[in-house]
């Protein structure tokens, strides 16, 4: 199948299988989202990471915006209420981990979790007009609280107060995503969100991305220099694709040729060095010399490969477009191998270097990646 046919298959799987399954089995009686569903299609009692709650709120809010007929609103609003009830701290930030009964186990700050709260606020504001004013207020309050308490003196944000090292590009990537979503919502503070998006874009282009090699590192010292030792050399192909996708979106809004050049280089490196030649799947980790650090393949890098490829296809033409469409087809095929499960609507998370999938429950956290990739493919292919 070509990428157009693959996209239609993925969209039907999402609408007919995944969304109904995760609406029924992925939400508990308290309104919270479960962490995992086992391969028999039943929820587990695994501890719940804070980030999963707003990610699932995003999924159901966006599904509702796009016309899914299931009870998306009950899932999204119930999930946000649970997120607030279980994870919100007196200081205004969200904690990190709870058990299946909703008892907070780890109240610590993680910038990553705050970024997803902001993403959920933006998407709920779009799809539930009656709550837009509330979401505007909550979004502004959390952004201002981040700026008042964990702002980095140069650019970006610290990892707590006092700050913990290493600092990471990944939380900033998701904050960048939340900024791009927030600046596009009518009524949100578009100047503030736009300025923060610009700040993170330039932090990425000037510091996260190596000026000589074009790779994007994961971990940094307090001055945004690469962190010492092997940790500072880590490069994740999935994030090369994901940053490429985000920088393309930002570049299209700002008219930034520099961002397009950087994004293309990230994509080329990810495709050339981060995709296993034998399995044709994006692997987990490289070092900064582009040697393989961890050959395991996880589901989420396949979705980011797909998102970046279709976005490039929508912005190019001729032979270049065909090249990106071909890459998108490979990414979609890789993704589909992870979706082949005993109960339709679930997914595998990890594939070994030998090609075998790890037998484990499906993590809810992957839904955000999958749903976004499927909708991005629909949107970008519709532009061709």
Image (cartoon, rainbow, N blue to C red):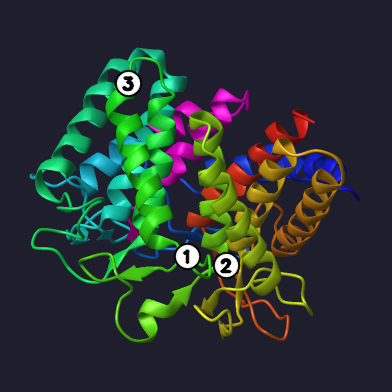
Residue contact at pointers 2 and 1, CB within 8 angstroms: no
> From which residue to which does the magenta span run?
48-77
Residue 207 in magenta stretch? no
Residue 100 x %, y %: 33, 59
Residue 65 lies within the magenta run: yes
Describe residue 163's horizontal placement relative to residue 334 as left or right: left
Q: Characterize the local packing of mark 3: few (<14), some (14-19) or many (20 or more) Cα atoms within 10 angstroms.
A: many
Is the stretch drawn in magenta largely helix, strand or loop? helix
Mark linked to residue 237: 2
Q: Secondary structure at mark 1?
A: loop
Residue at 16 percent across and 35 percent down: it is: 144
Tag 1 residue = 216
Residue 359 is situated, as x and y percent measured from the top left of the image, at 61, 76
The reply to whether callout 3 and callout 2 are in contact (CB within 8 Å) is: no
Number of the front mark, 3 or 1: 1
Which residue bears the numbered disc 3? 188
| Front one among 48 and 336 | 336
């Amino acid at each position: 199948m070509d990428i157009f046919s693959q996209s239609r298959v993925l969209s039907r799987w999402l609408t007919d299988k995944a969304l109904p399954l995760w609406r029924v089995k992925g939400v508990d009686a308290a309104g919270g989202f479960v962490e995992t569903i086992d391969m028999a299609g039943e929820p587990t009692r695994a501890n719940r990471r804070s980030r999963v709650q707003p990610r699932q709120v995003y999924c159901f809010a966006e599904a509702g915006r796009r016309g899914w007929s299931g009870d998306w609103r009950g899932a999204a609003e119930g999930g946000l209420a649970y997120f607030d009830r279980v994870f919100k701290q007196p200081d205004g930030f969200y904690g990190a981990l709870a058990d299946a009964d909703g008892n907070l186990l780890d109240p610590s700050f993680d910038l990553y979790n705050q970024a997803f709260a902001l993403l959920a606020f933006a998407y709920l504001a779009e799809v539930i007009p009656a709550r837009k004013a509330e979401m505007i207020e909550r979004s502004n309050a959390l952004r201002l609280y981040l700026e008042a308490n964990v702002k980095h003196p140069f650019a970006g944000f610290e990892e707590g107060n006092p700050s913990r090292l290493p600092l990471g590009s990944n939380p900033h990537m998701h904050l960048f995503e939340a900024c791009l979503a927030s600046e596009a919502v009518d009524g949100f503070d578009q100047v503030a969100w736009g300025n923060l998006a610009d700040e993170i874009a330039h932090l990425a282009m000037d510091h996260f991305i190596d000026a000589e090699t074009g790779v994007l590192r994961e971990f940094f010292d307090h001055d945004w220099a690469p962190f010492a030792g092997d940790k500072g050399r880590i490069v994740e192909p999935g994030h090369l694709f994901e940053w490429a996708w985000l920088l393309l979106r930002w570049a299209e809004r700002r008219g930034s040729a520099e961002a397009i050049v950087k994004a293309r280089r990230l994509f080329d490196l990810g495709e050339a060095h981060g995709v296993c030649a034998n399995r044709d799947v994006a692997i987990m980790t490289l070092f900064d010399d582009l040697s393989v650090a961890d050959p395991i393949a996880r589901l989420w890098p396949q979705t980011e490969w797909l998102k970046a490829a279709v976005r490039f296809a929508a912005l190019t033409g001729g032979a270049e477009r065909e090249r990106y469409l071909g890459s998108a087809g490979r990414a979609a095929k890789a993704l589909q191998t992870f979706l082949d499960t005993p109960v339709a609507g679930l997914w595998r998370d990890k594939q070994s270097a030998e090609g075998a999938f790890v037998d484990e429950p499906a993590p809810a956290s992957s839904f955000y990646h999958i749903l976004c990739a499927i909708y991005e493919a629909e949107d970008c292919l519709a532009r061709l």
